[in-house]
Image: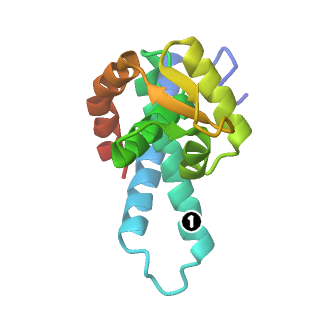
């Protein structure tokens, strides 16, 4: 009878070997991916393969940033919105309209509007109408600025750690 992972015969030593093999396989895969990304101009390389590798790397980054934001009760999209709004405010030296944030993040305005309302409920942003009355101007609160400052180093650290 062959021992399977879920059978009683699958003892601790076998489980340790199984876990070690999985870790070793993952390490080999990451090493291979790193090598591949360092020399992407290899003959026969397909643009699709390169874009897929970039996407996978971006997803790893997103998960790590989301983990860094979890302690502040922020989702990745909320952090991204706050960080982008801060960048736009720094560039313009004034509050920004939601449409500018949507354009910067390449999201539809409805999605940005819903996220801004949730952030406003948490007192992280303040909104006010613009002079035309057709758009919402977004301001970051002092609390949001402190939150972004506190998250800056941890997010930079995880960003630097992604291959």
Q: How is the image coloured?
A: rainbow
In the displayed structure, 146 sits above or below 85; it is above
- Dividing the picture into quadrants, the one containing residue 109 is top right
Q: Secondary structure at mark 1?
A: helix
Name the residue rendered at 47%, 32% in the picture. Answer: 82
Residue 23 visible? The answer is: no
In the displayed structure, 77 sits above or below 28; it is above
Outermost residue to the bottom: 43
Percent x, y of residue 49? 58, 69
Name the residue rendered at 56%, 47% in the picture. Answer: 100
Percent x, y of residue 98? 59, 39
Q: Please tell me how many numbered marks the rendered image carries.
A: 1
Give the labeled residue for mark 1: 51
- Dividing the picture into quadrants, the one containing residue 31 is bottom left
In the rendered image, the quadrant that contains the N terminus is: top right
Q: Is residue 78 left or right of residue 36?
A: right
- Dividing the picture into quadrants, the one containing residue 95 is top left
Q: Is residue 162 left or right of residue 57?
A: left
Q: Is residue 88 left or right of residue 121?
A: left
Q: Nearer the viewer, residue 136 or 38?
A: 136
Residue 2 visible? The answer is: yes
Percent x, y of residue 76? 52, 32
Q: Is residue 149 left or right of residue 102?
A: left
Neighbourhood count class around disc 1 (C-alpha, 10 Å): few under 14, some 14–19, many 20 upward: few
Percent x, y of residue 23? 44, 38
Name the residue rendered at 51%, 59% in the picture. Answer: 54
Outermost residue to the front: 131
């Amino acid at each position: 009878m062959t021992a399977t992972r879920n059978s009683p015969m699958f003892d601790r030593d076998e489980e340790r070997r199984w876990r070690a093999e999985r870790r070793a396989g993952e390490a080999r895969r990451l090493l291979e991916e790193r090598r591949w990304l360092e020399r992407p101009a290899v003959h026969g390389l397909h643009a699709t393969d390169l874009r897929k590798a970039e996407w996978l790397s971006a997803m790893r980054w997103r998960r790590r940033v989301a983990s860094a934001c979890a302690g502040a009760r922020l989702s990745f999209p909320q952090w991204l919105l706050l960080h982008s709004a801060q960048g736009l405010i720094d560039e313009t030296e004034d509050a920004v309209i939601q449409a500018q944030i949507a354009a910067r993040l390449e999201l539809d305005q409805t999605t940005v509007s819903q996220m801004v309302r949730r952030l406003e409920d948490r007192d992280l942003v303040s909104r006010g109408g613009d002079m035309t009355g057709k758009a919402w101007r977004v301001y970051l609160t002092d609390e949001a600025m402190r939150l972004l400052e506190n998250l800056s180093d941890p997010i930079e650290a995880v960003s630097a750690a992604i291959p």
